[in-house]
Image (cartoon, rainbow, N blue to C red):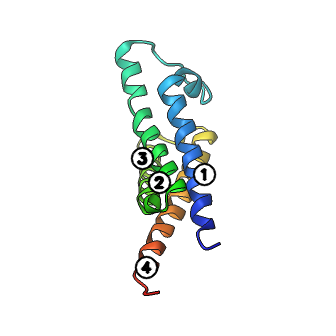
Amino acid sequence: MQNLPIKIALVLSAATFLSIGVFITFFPAYLFSLNGLSLDPSAAMMSDIRAPGVPILLAGAITLLGLFNRAFERPALLASASLMLAYGAGRLISISLDGVPPASLLIAMAIEFGLGAWCGWLFGKTAISSKIPA
């Protein structure tokens, strides 16, 4: 099966986006407590914390579309690569400005860079193969 790597990458991306998006949007205190942080329950703080959860959920939905509809594979790979690499880059910037975070966040950064690079590579590969005449 030619697109098995694409399906695997999209499953991993969708699972990541949907789980993280749900936790950030609906259970942020629990998610942040896993890294030893307690959130200020003020409306302003919680608004800023929850807001990125919805775009992450949207990326999960786009990724699911790509998993089940071949026409959406490339947009799903692009969304996955973009969001994963952006989060990884943000963590890298934070390391240089703020110092080294807990190991769990370093692992998250490695996953984001790894899965993002893989999705980006698959996106590029599908662009090349779509230009080759059958």
| Closer to viewer: mark 4 or mark 3 | 4
Residue identified by numbered label 1: 12
Q: CA distance from mark 1 to mark 2?
A: 10 Å
Residue at 42%, 59% (x, y): give it.
Answer: 78
- Circle 1 residues within 10 Å: few <14, some 14–19, many ≥20: some
On the rendered structure, is 37 left or right of 74? right
The circle drawn on residue 80 is 2
Query: Which element type, helix, strand or loop, lies under badge 1?
Result: helix
* Residue 72 in the image: above or below residue 17: below
Amino acid type at circle 4 is: Ile
Residue 83: x percent and y percent? 43, 50
* Residue 15 in the image: above or below residue 130: above
Amino acid type at circle 1 is: Leu
Q: CA distance from mark 3 to mark 2?
A: 15 Å
Q: Earlier in the sequence, mark 1 or mark 4?
A: 1
Query: Which element type, helix, strand or loop, lies under badge 4?
Result: helix
Residue identified by numbered label 3: 90
